[in-house]
Amino acid sequence: MRKIKVGIEGNGTVRIKLKKKINVTSADISGTGKPSISDKVFEGFSLPFSIINQMEIRVESVFRPKQQDFEVVYALSGQNWIVDQLHKLSSNEVVAQATPEMVSYYTGMMAEQIYQERSNEPRLIIHVHSHPYAPPMLSGIDRDSMAGNARRMKDRFPEATVIFGIHSVSSEQRRQRIPPKKSFKNLISWSSITRVHEVAFFDEFEKPVEVRLGE
Ligand SMILES: [Zn+2]
């Protein structure tokens, strides 16, 4: 069954979230021999510079001449508290619709693609979407959808810690490259030669999640 939720933003934009239930046959994903991180106290995660570079490319690649950037969705994953992979999720299977103001997606299919790309069950999943020309703050729709998205991701990966990232990207103009730095405990920022990037991380309850650079 497919439920459709429609929300109206302050500027009159209609945002539609399609929720598609994906039935998954159980697979043997246990026995990896790695310790579970779900027992430990979660105190943030590490984000390597190589992954930040991929995040920059993923978000800037939507550029089209004389057109506004679209919102994009992608995911980061890891076995422990360290991100080791970026999942582009740039396919019709995952993304239902994208405009400069919104992106709608199928969380169940997102989980499937993450599993296929990793070939194992991630213990850390960071669900990221971009905010073109807007700050890295949770919108009303973001707040309303986080708990449901986390639940659907945990339906597939019960052991995983699910985090949300808001990737803000500025308009395009030539500027000085500034390497990534931590601006606040849950916020990183940097500049490419054309865009300012800021990414903020939250848990499903909208609480800031600490990010560490490097590793
Ligand atoms: Zn948002």
Image (tube, rainbow, N blue to C red):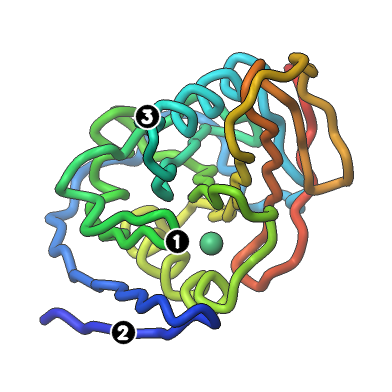
Residue placed at 79% from the left, 32% from the top? 212
Nearer to us of marks 2 and 1 is 1
Disc 2 versus disc 1: distance between alpha carbons? 16 Å
Nearer to us of marks 2 and 3 is 3
Nearer to us of marks 1 and 3 is 3
Residue type indicated by callout 1? Glu
Residue position marked by numbered label 2 in the rendering: 5
Residue furthest out toward the right = 184
Residue position marked by numbered label 3 in the rendering: 65
Rendered position, 204 above or below 178: below
The quarter in which the N terminus is drawn is bottom left
**Mark 1 closeness class: few <14, some 14–19, many ≥20 residues within 10 Å:** some
Q: Return the disc, 1 or 3, that comes first in the chain's sequence.
A: 3
Residue type indicated by callout 3? Pro
Image location (x, y in percent) of residue 100: 42, 54
Q: Return the disc, 2 or 3, that comes first in the chain's sequence.
A: 2
Residue type indicated by callout 2? Lys
Disc 2 versus disc 3: distance between alpha carbons? 32 Å
In the rendered structure, the answer to whether residue 215 lies left or right of residue 1 reads: right
Residue placed at 52% from the left, 32% from the top? 79
Residue placed at 58% from the left, 78% from the top? 140
In the rendered structure, the answer to whether residue 57 lies left or right of residue 97 reads: right
